[in-house]
Image (cartoon, rainbow, N blue to C red):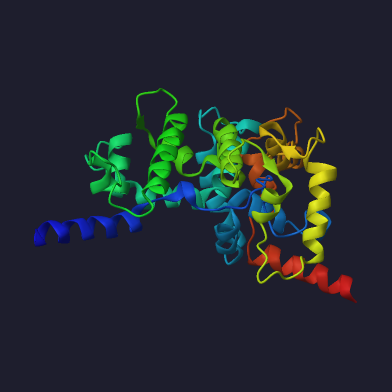
Amino acid sequence: MKLLGTLCLLALSALWVLCKPTQEKKDRIHHSKDLSDHHHDDSQGYQYDHEAFLGKEEAKTFDQLTPEESKERLGKIVNKIDKNKDNFITHEELQEWIKRSQNRYIYENVNKHWRDYDKNQDNRISWEEYKNTTYGYYAAAEEEFSDLEDKDTYRRMMKRDERRFKQADRDGDMIATREEFTAFLHPEESDYMKDLVVTETLEDMDKNGDGLVDVDEYISDMYSAENDEPEPDWVASERQQFLDVRDLNKDGKMDHSEVSYWILPSQYDPIDVESKHLIYESDKDKDEKLTKQEILDNWNMFVGSQATNYGEDLTRRHDEF
């Protein structure tokens, strides 16, 4: 009995450690994120373009290179971007590269945890592998979580994980490829998962279980009063925002479509815009695609170096005077 108790305690500890991501609260509004912290003004320099094309961390590496080293590395990047090896970089290929550069942290996160879940090392992760790794002893128990005080919470978590796994699993075999597992862990980054993101958001905020979000539920998601203190001005402003902007049909609540309009409102795609911009500025023969030479001829827009940064610093100093 003592051994059994010890095993249960260890299983419970593992459960608390491994129970995962679908319950973590994130920023509700998934606007297309900025590609750079810099203002996009080519007359003042190309730092925005560098960070958009390379990602913020990789852009810092290029900033330390000589022009020769920077152009050499850029040439190797162009070879990677040209997926079909036709010696042209299309708008679609450039978009895909920028998306990967911007989402590098996501892919690194997936890679970091991949071995934890791929128990049989077949380079795929089944629902059973994920469930057993995440929920351990309780995943196989006949009465799931029955001895836990908050068992209903964990049951909901596992059901929600399973629903999300099914949605991410495009071929319906309940075995996730790396791409599908990425969509499972980071659904806000995959177009085909966005409706589920809306559903999960609504469920998180809907405290009374009526399938809708009223103004108090909307406010409680971002602010909780303590000791009957008066609400700050910004909370009153958010209440009015709910009435004027969020509640589109003016029935006092947000339904699924209104939540969707709120958290996924933007039709502006900065990756699409930046891809078109880089092509427009580098496409000498105006065939709406780029050769490797056209990119290298305009290398300082795509990547940085000590030389380009020095030039930008001089320009800024001149403007200051």
Q: Quadrant of the N terminus?
A: bottom left
In this rendered view, identify the residue nearer to me: 287 or 253: 253
Relative to 181, say whether 14 is above or below. below
Using the rendered view, name the quadrant where residue 87 is placed.
top right
In this rendered view, identify the residue nearer to me: 71 or 199: 199
Query: Taking the image as drawn, is residue 276 in sight?
Result: no
Relative to residue 32, is residue 178 drawn left or right? left
Using the rendered view, name the quadrant where residue 270 is placed.
top right
Across the whole image, how many numbered discs are drawn on residues? 0
Relative to 305, say whether 71 is above or below. above
In this rendered view, identify the residue nearer to me: 66 or 25: 25
Relative to residue 101, is residue 156 drawn left or right? left
Q: Residue furthest bottom?
A: 321
Q: Residue furthest front?
A: 228
Task: Residue at 55%, 40% (x, y): give it.
Answer: 200
Task: Residue at 61%, 35% (x, y): give it.
Answer: 211
Percent position of residue 114, x then y: 34, 46
Percent position of residue 312, x then y: 76, 65
Percent position of residue 320, x then y: 88, 74
